[in-house]
Image (spheres, rainbow, N blue to C red):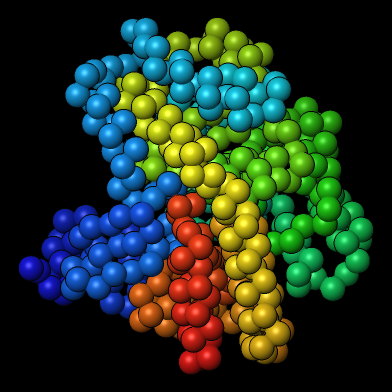
């Protein structure tokens, strides 16, 4: 078996060193089942980080559906296929009225790119509003609005950014914080209008995952949506991280946030690792776009993807994964809150369902070095987590939704232990 050093050398000589690897000494997993991964050394690791294997690594229902459909036929959307419409009906049934049409894609980036096209064609405008610390994908248009990851592309002239507040660290009254953010938004809107771009859309992850899950004033997100709509723009919710029951209480992050967007994009957990994504919107937006563009996506919306997507929804329903996320997430958050009481450097416990965070700070300043130490210390305890946020000072605990009651005490005790060590 190749050593870690040998693999790193081969990696650098082929795919290159620039896509970040996790950990000072990277891990090499050779197999996985449920929420457990087996490393080349034979050691087992608990997955409290990965959201793509949503219903569990190597999930039997998903693998069976995929192989059965692939053994029968896989074909594109230029032929009729009942399975694709079966899945589409099931997926659309999870949305509020008015969000009743779906376009398929192969990645979150593709879905967001299409959402931008739909918004641009509806409004005739190009101006975009995004958070000042966010990530929505890899294409040129998305790179031009990337604020939370290193990119060489400068911010597009048609992009304005909004600083989302965090009541967990902002001492001002919520109403003042909200009013301040909306003023910032209005200034951005006027600036786009004056520059001739107009307002095409705002695009947000309803949980603000990359941002580090800030706690927004109640109703702020809907007020932002109202202001954008009043200026003629559409509201796009990027559910790549927040969707598919992640919040525990709602299937979609925008439902959790009390928002009805014009366009919703999704990816990552949708196919449990099989590459698939979607844009959900209204019949009117679909007709408007579809009638003006011959839109064809070779791989998207094929019956194998539909079979996989359907199996993910079935597994979620059968195993009651969203409900489980709510119960376990609430219990986990209580444990995390106890860690805030116990350790000076743990500032806030945050999150919902199976998306939780611990914010580290020393003397009121974010402490990314401590967060990094804890992520490494958790690895030493064979538990995978990561970190997020503007300063990378917030622990990111976002396991597959298949995470169970048996695993929760392992996660909590490893974290308690890791915190005591640093
Ligand atoms: N949106 C969000 C919120 C994401 O987290 C990501 C991926 N990290 C993307 C979009 C892009 O998705 P993909 O990598 O599938 O293109």
Depth check: 16 or 367 in front?
A: 367
* Position of residue 169 measured from the top left corner of the image (x, y, whole percent): 76, 72
* Left or right position of 177 against 76: right
The N terminus lies in quadrant: bottom left
* Position of residue 320 measured from the top left corner of the image (x, y, whole percent): 54, 44
Depth check: 375 or 109 in front?
A: 375
Looking at the image, is 143 positioned above or below residue 275?
below
Q: Residue at x 38, y 58 (%)?
A: 35
* Left or right position of 374 against 106: right
Q: Residue at x 78, y 27 (%)?
A: 232
Looking at the image, is 130 positioned above or below residue 96?
below
**Image quadrant where residue 305 sits:** top left
Q: Residue at x 42, y 57 (%)?
A: 50
Q: Residue at x 53, y 47 (%)?
A: 321
**Image quadrant where residue 300 sits:** top left
Q: How many marks?
A: 0
Name the residue furthest left: 1
User: Is any part of residue 409 visible from this angle?
Assistant: yes
Looking at the image, is 326 positioned above or below residue 42?
above
* Left or right position of 287 against 56: right
User: Is any part of residue 151 visible from this angle?
Assistant: no
* Position of residue 339 measured from the top left corner of the image (x, y, whole percent): 63, 82
Looking at the image, is 29 positioned above or below residue 338?
above
* Position of residue 151 measured from the top left corner of the image (x, y, whole percent): 46, 55
């Amino acid at each position: 078996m190749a050593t870690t050093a040998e693999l790193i050398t081969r990696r650098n000589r082929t795919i290159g060193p620039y896509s970040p690897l996790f950990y000072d000494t990277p891990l090499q997993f050779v197999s996985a089942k449920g929420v457990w991964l087996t490393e080349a050394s034979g050691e087992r690791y608990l997955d409290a980080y990965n959201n793509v294997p949503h219903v569990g690594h190597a999930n039997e229902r998903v693998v069976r559906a995929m192989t059965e459909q692939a053994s029968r036929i896989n074909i594109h959307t230029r032929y009729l296929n009942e399975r694709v419409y079966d899945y589409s009906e099931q997926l659309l049934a999870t949305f509020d009225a008015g969000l009743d049409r779906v376009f398929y894609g192969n990645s979150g980036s593709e879905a967001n790119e299409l959402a931008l096209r739909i918004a641009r064609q509806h409004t005739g405008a190009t101006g975009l509003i995004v958070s000042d610390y966010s990530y929505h994908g890899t294409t040129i248009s998305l790179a031009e609005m990337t604020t939370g990851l290193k990119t060489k592309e400068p911010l597009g002239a048609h992009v304005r950014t909004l600083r989302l507040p965090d009541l967990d660290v902002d001492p001002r009254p919520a109403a003042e914080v909200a009013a301040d953010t909306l003023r910032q938004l209005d200034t951005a809107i006027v600036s786009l209008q004056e520059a001739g771009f107009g307002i095409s859309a705002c695009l947000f992850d309803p949980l603000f995952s990359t941002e580090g899950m800030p706690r927004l004033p109640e109703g702020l997100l809907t007020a932002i949506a109202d202001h954008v709509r009043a200026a003629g723009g559409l509201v796009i919710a990027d559910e790549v991280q927040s969707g598919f029951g992640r919040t525990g209480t709602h299937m979609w992050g925008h439902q959790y946030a009390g928002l009805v967007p014009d366009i919703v994009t999704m990816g990552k957990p949708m196919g449990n690792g099989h590459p698939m994504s979607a844009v959900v919107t209204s019949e009117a937006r679909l007709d408007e776009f579809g009638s003006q563009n011959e839109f064809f996506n070779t791989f998207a919306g094929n019956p194998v993807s539909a079979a996989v997507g359907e199996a993910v929804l079935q597994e979620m329903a059968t195993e009651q994964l969203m409900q489980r996320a709510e119960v376990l997430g609430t219990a986990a958050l209580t444990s995390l809150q106890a860690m805030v009481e116990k350790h000076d450097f743990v500032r806030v416990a945050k999150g919902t369902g199976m998306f939780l965070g611990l914010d580290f700070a020393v003397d009121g300043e974010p402490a990314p070095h401590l967060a990094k130490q804890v992520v490494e210390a958790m690895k030493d305890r064979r538990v995978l987590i990561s970190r997020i946020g503007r300063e990378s000072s917030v622990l990111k605990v976002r396991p597959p939704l298949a995470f169970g009651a048996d695993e929760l005490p392992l996660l909590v005790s490893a974290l308690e232990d890791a915190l005591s060590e640093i």
